[in-house]
Image (cartoon, rainbow, N blue to C red):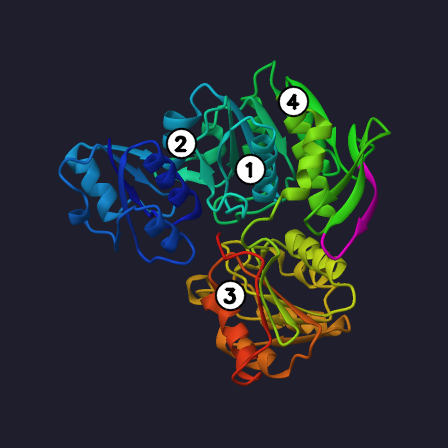
Amino acid sequence: MKVHLVAICGTGMGALAGLLKEAGHDVKGSDRAFYSPMAERLVAWGIPTQEGFDPAHLDPDTDLVIVGNVCRKDNPEAQAALRMGVKVTSFPQALAEFFIGDKTSIVVAGTHGKTTTAALLAYVLVEAGRDPSFLVGGIPHNFGKSFHLGKGDVFVVEGDEYDAAFFDKRPKFVHYRPTIVVLTAVEFDHADIYRDMDTYRAAFRALLSLLPRDGVLVACTDDPEVAALSRTASCRVVAYGLESGAAWSAEDIAAGEDATRFWLMRDGRRVAAVGLPLAGRHNVANTLGVLAAAEAVGVDVHQAAASLAGFAGIARRMQVRGVVDGVTVIDDFAHHPTKVRETVRAARARYPDAHLVAVFEPRTATSRRKVFQDAYPASFAAADEVVVVPPFDAEKIPAAERFDSAALVAAVRQAGRKAALRSNADEVAADLGGRLGRGSVVLIMSNGAFDNIHEKLLSALRARCGPRPRTRDSNGTEDD
């Protein structure tokens, strides 16, 4: 089949293109711009791309056009496909039709932790010999790609609550035919498409309503919204959490330089000692959900727990991009205030004696708005220093609704921590690269490219070292 993807460079769309290519289809696509790392991945996978949206990009013999949810209804390629009579579908519809089918579908959903939980679950199932298919929103370093077309009977998919396409405003995850749902957290987000918490909550209720009676809901009952939603499920509910007395829990959690260690608990009894190569209590909770879901499809819990030590992490999730002249530069996807808080705490736990600088770019549709203006200051409490830039494409948000980066800086200062507002990535790199001492850690948080700030900062650090800098490569390439 000849398939064209409109807006192919998105995380999910690019992964779907890779799956289609792996399945033997003739695949190509287009986008307005091509950002690292997906741009390089598409080239590596042998998928041709064209810049811009132009009806001429559609070949006359195209069989299927898949439209990304960033496209508006006036997208010229989508409209051309409709005029040509070519079948047009959305990313989640195509994923369900071509790949999920009648497999045991494990949908990992929630406001936070979806990517890590889904990727770790896929890894555990691979290590258990189940050869699952999967599609996640980040690139696990163990696999080097965010998708796999396996021969096993399980499909692990990251379930996004964002809408499917301009012609289908339902959440993506309602298309994924769930047998098992792992629900990590439910906290208001995506203010551009959900008007309030009630409508946001309703999306997750709709997902749970799709679970069959013989299905399983794996629920993080630390979260009160998840706990309440779990009571609406008509299937078996397996609870996990760190604070709720859940069936799956953890104790003696200890942060280390290379791992977080804890005892896995089942119904109050110690089951296994775990060494998790991820930082933060939130990732311990995510791991509990993984182990519960793996057991639900027949994986031995001791085998699953032992395999965790080999997980190499995910691109743009606490990813060390480099260490130059004693300064560590970390890339993370955090953007919601809760995720920012947990990520900063995780960095502090991993580097307890470091001078920790948290750099934040408001870039999502929600973080660029004032929805969480009052919540963000406390999210940075574990940092020694905070650097903020203005919202991305700020002029596209009405002034009355726009997030105020200067106000965030003022609030952080009022709380007694050092904070600064910088205009752009170049200013941040020049400032930090010129003054940070050895032993500093820079945690850069953005859900976008942030104008290649990581390499700009590393270059500034190298420049101060002279011709032979003391440099260590990162422990993984940027792959998200």
Write the residue at 50% across / 60% down.
363
**Pointer 3 or 1: first along the chain:** 1
Residue identifier under label 3: 391
Residue 411: name its quadrant. bottom right
Residue identifier under label 4: 296
Q: Position of residue 8 (x, y in %)?
A: 34, 47
**Pointer 4 or 3: first along the chain:** 4
Circle nearer the viewer, 2 or 4: 4
Magenta region: which residues?
250-258
Q: Main secondary structure of the magenta part?
A: strand
Residue 230: name its quadrant. top right
Q: Which mark is residue 95?
A: 2
Query: Residue 353 in magenta?
Result: no
* Element assignment for label 3: loop
* Element assignment for label 4: helix
**Pointer 2 or 4: first along the chain:** 2
Q: CA distance from mark 2 to mark 4?
A: 23 Å
Are the residues flagged by discs 4 and 3 in contact, CB closer than 8 Å?
no
Identity, as a three-letter code, of the amino acid under mark 4: Ala
Q: CA distance from mark 2 to mark 3?
A: 33 Å
Dot 2: within a 10 Å radius of its alpha carbon, few (fewer than 14), some, or many (20 or more) residues? many
